[in-house]
Image: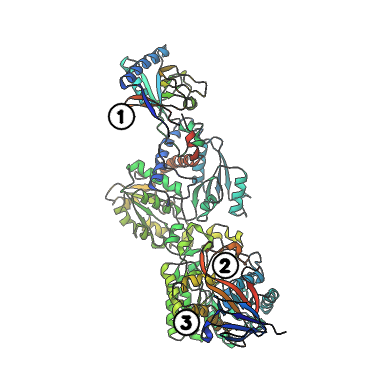
Amino acid sequence: MSQTHNETVLSGPEIQQKIDEMAAAVYTLAGEPKELVLVGIQRRGVPLAERLSNVLKEKGVAVELGALDITLYRDDLETVGPRPVIGETRIPGELAGKYVVIVDDVLYTGRTIRAALDELTDFGRPDKIALCVLVDRGGRELPIQADVTGATVSVDVNSRVDVFLDEIDGKDAVELSRGWRE
Amino acid sequence: MNKKVLLKGGHVIDPANNIDGDQDVLISNGVVQAVGPGLDADGAEVIDVTGKVVAPGLIDIHVHFREPGFEESETVATGAMAAVAGGFTTVCPMPNTDPVTDNQAAVGFIVKQARDAGLARVLPIAAISLGQKGEKLTEFGEVIGAGAVAVSDDGKPVVSSHLMRTALEYAQTFDIPVVNHCEDPTLAEGGSMHEGLVSSRLGLKGIPSAAESIMVARDVLLAELTGGHIHLCHMSTKESIDIIRQAKARGVNVTAEVTPHHLVLQDAKCEGYDTNSKMNPPLRTDVDVQACVDALVDGTIDVVATDHAPHHYELKEREFENAPFGIVGLETALGLCISQLVDTKLLTLSDLISKMSHLPAKVFGIPGGDLAVGNPADVVVFDANEKWEVDPDSFRSKSKNTPFAGWELKGRVHRTMVAGRTVFELGVS
Amino acid sequence: MSAVSLGKDLIGLEHLTPEQIQLVLDTAEPFKEVSERQIKKVPTLRGKTIVNLFYEASTRTRISFEFAEKRLSADTVNIAASGSSIVKGENLVDTARNLEAMRIDMVVIRHPSSGAPGFLADRIPSNVVNGGDGKHEHPTQALLDILTIRDNLKTISGLKVCICGDVLHSRVARSNIWGLLALGAEVGVCGPKSLMPYGLEELGVRFFPRPEEAIEWADVLNILRLQLERMNAGFIPSLREYNRVFGITNARLERAPKDILVLHPGPMNRGVEIDSDVADGPHSVILDQVTNGIAVRMAVLYLLAGGKPDLAEGAKG
């Protein structure tokens, strides 16, 4: 039986504060004002992208929003069963010439981002693609790094980082469960 | 040489002679010499049959042995082996061979193959019409002379009413039954199972009950018209049975048979497109099964016949519509009938034996079916209470197409004797 | 994550649960969007080999499956009954063994004999999808019909759907009946009694002998193609009379008490079972069916492919 131990990494207000900081970093990263597209990865990347865009819009930055479900680009479908439910993919118009920021909740192995990059490039050729995540938990299996990170936690493979967002989960929190496997 | 065998300690059931009790049977020179309690061995070889039933060898007036033409499915020899393993000492193979058994040479060939095999008595049924084409009568006199005991176009119906009428009239010269497979081809065409809810669901074209009963009605009327003896194969529907019951009440010379599977299985057995449940006539409904059982019990249907229809496994390993009709029956018939009819108290064991030996002989006017002194000693010894599981791999038949694989049956054949000679002994191959 | 799965094969809708049918419909939704992309292709089934084994002529079903397969990046091979030695004269067991020996992953089979796809599925480890078998089932057609109805009327439960025409010989009708009943619709059939299978009422299906009564009752009409050879087989006297008595015409639809949705699995015999003014009119969603066909088939292939549940533990993001 596993010994589960939960601890809160980020509280609700801390999350909102991180999002504000991330929005600022995304803006800085953009440099020359280009057409900015925030593409959230299903599921929790989507409301995160929306929140980021709200912050940016308040600052008067024009942002387009998109959503991406990377299930059909996963490299582990063979081993997944039953099949994952596929969420909506919505890319606003042409990507060519735009600055696309992929938004996700947790960055772990990097495989999701690999799939997202493949899928995005099938939609067009943006000028630049950046990655923005709320939590980087380490444990990469591919050479992928975030350009904007809300928080970094260092945990081993036996631990799990869960992001809860009000839009989906009814609360805002980032929790760490240690020893969830054995 | 005067070889004597004493079957000692058994329970003799000989319905024709009203015997149903613990008695011994003494066989001498291949014929029954004495039946009675506590018989003296008198130098005979003694076979202890304590706890077992000793009965006249079973007679199956409807089998298919596939030779000549379809030897990959069965031969006269393997069919005869299956027969004796099932307790049958006399069997009547149908003429739907290739070429069709419609002349004296063809009948003679089967007789010869049976003699060479030296197992069951094989009394062929010749075709009614040349090539079973339903056009010209075969030479009844010649085929009877060569050893045939009845005529039938089984596998196909006699469609022409005129031909059936003529056959019923002409057969009276030879005192043989005309045996018909009743099926209106215009209603049955393309069908592969009973027309009902199951066929609707499975998307298979059905064979309506009326396809059978329409022709039963016609045949009964023609028998009435001509005074000939019509024997109706493998009855499967309540409507057919009602017609036969009325005809018998009017004194029409009609006899009928039912297969063990039509006494036991319904059309739902075809679920999953199980080709071993595909037979013609098809498995029908609960109501029909009940009607068949009732008719056998009250004598409306005279006898049990297996319609033993072997098919090579490859032929059945197909899409349902493309698989041939029929199942093997010789090696499961007795067990099925005891389990389903005697064990349930619908029939006494003596009545069942009668419907599987004495009455078939009477219907076809052929020897056998009793243990009268002086008659050939065709005998089956079986344990009426022994349970066994049907394992098609153990069948003597060349084909294994049965829907009863894995069934537990009650009543197992231990020994079969033809003319006093043991031709089958359980556990001895 | 949903614990519902389709299993190894899709043979028919009769034995699927409402949840499984729902799963296919819901999974089809995101696939509609894939076909709207500029690059209409996702790598989901890359490296998978799919054989389209068609023992019966078919244009639209085969093309629809082929589009679905290609848009999922599968490698496809088409084997048609005409002109292929693998089919001609060879029994289905041998064909199955041959395909297996070629290390394929999935088979889409269309066969004139009812039960053939199930027969194949029992004998090979590959996934088998029924593309229509005899008079038995055509599950993907029914799923796309139901999806089209759901798209337009937002629900299936409680709807009155009438299937019109040659129900006796129709695998489309059977699959629709099972799927619609499972999802809580009321189902009716309409056509000459000579083209109705035995005992449908026992399944809870209403029979309407005349189209006027069906139109009075229904929210949706699914009009089956009348196989022209049925006339020669004596099931109906003539096509002209069929159209006059059973054809779905605007004149008949105008008397409907409510808006009726009209579906047809195609190909249509205009002027026989359906008049052109209906087929091309405002009630018709026939072309939506075609579009949805690809999404439904992509969903089915996606749901069946791979997916070994014992390895699910290894999934991580």
- Labels 2 and 3 touching (C-beta < 8 A): no
Q: Report in which chain the residue with disc 1 lies.
A: A
In the picture, measured across the screen, residue B119 lies left or right of residue A19, that is: right
Quarter location, residue C20: top left
In the picture, measured across the screen, residue B122 lies left or right of residue B218, that is: right
Could you classify mark 2 by the number of other residues whose Cα lies within 10 Å: few (under 14), some (14-19), or many (20 or more)? many
Q: Report in which chain the residue with disc 2 lies.
A: B
Q: Amino acid at mark 3?
A: Leu
- SS class of the residue under badge 2? loop
Reading the image, the residue beneath label 1 is A170
Disc number for residue B108: none
Could you classify mark 3 by the number of other residues whose Cα lies within 10 Å: few (under 14), some (14-19), or many (20 or more)? some
Q: Position of residue A55 (x, y in %)?
A: 33, 18
Q: Quadrant of the N terminus of chain C?
A: top left
Reading the image, the residue beneath label 3 is B221
Q: Amino acid at mark 1?
A: Gly
Q: Position of residue A66 (x, y in %)?
A: 39, 25
Q: Earlier in the sequence, mark 2 or mark 3?
A: 3
Q: Nearer the viewer, residue B76 or A6?
A: A6
Quarter location, residue B37: bottom right
Q: Is residue B274 above or below residue A41?
A: below
Tell us which disc is closer to us: 1 or 3.
1
- SS class of the residue under badge 3? helix
- Labels 1 and 3 touching (C-beta < 8 A): no
Per the model, the C-alpha gap separating discs 2 and 1 is 67 Å
Could you classify mark 1 by the number of other residues whose Cα lies within 10 Å: few (under 14), some (14-19), or many (20 or more)? few
Reading the image, the residue beneath label 2 is B328
Q: Nearer the viewer, residue B9 or A167?
A: B9
Q: Amino acid at mark 2?
A: Val
Tell us which disc is closer to us: 2 or 3.
2
**Same chain letter for marks 1 and 3:** no
Per the model, the C-alpha gap separating discs 1 and 3 is 83 Å
